[in-house]
Image (cartoon, rainbow, N blue to C red):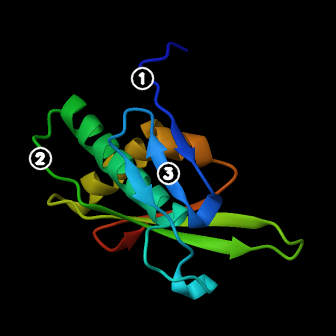
Amino acid sequence: MKTIYTTSAKASAGRNGQVKSDDGLLDVSLSYPKALGGSGEATNPEQLFAAGYSACFSNAVLHIAGLQKLGLREAPTEAKVRLLAKENGAFALAVDLSVELAMDNDAAIELVKSAHQVCPYSNAVRGNVDVSLSVNGISLD
């Protein structure tokens, strides 16, 4: 495969530190969420993952729509990321992706299924993270 973009980010002290991208455009404080006993005064890795996945998946939908010349301009996508505690002390993630498309439901379903095959986040987590999909309130599971 050919690399088309590379970036990096560095975290200073885990969930209670700072994370900064190599170009300085991302520079945020981190804290444990209140649900995990933290202050909740800053963002957390799950929120950052949700933001990245929702943006990437929305773009994958628009990319496929563009290839199909559908004229779609927006693909609102919400990524609900859940942090799970395993019995062995390890942790896992699960993601619910919800897409809203102003189009026929059958066409929307096919578009979202296609986007799930090309989205780099979906490809990165496939087989390791439980991802559920829905479009216009219709579950694709």
Residue under the image location 63 percent in, 59 percent down: 14
* Picture disc at residue 19: 3
Dot 2, crowdedness within 10 Å: few (<14), some or many (≥20)?
Answer: few
Residue 28, visible in the rendered structure: yes
Name the amino acid, label 1: Tyr
Which residue shows up at 57% across the image and 86% down it? 35
N-term mark: 3 or 1: 1
**Res 5 label:** 1
Q: Is residue 59 above or below residue 4?
A: below
Label 2 SS: loop
Residue for badge 2: 73
Q: Is residue 130 above or below residue 111?
A: below
Rendered residue at 44%/33% (across/down)? 22
Of discs 3 and 1, which sits in the foreground?
A: 3
Q: In this picture, is 108 found above or below 115?
A: below
Secondary structure found at label 1: loop
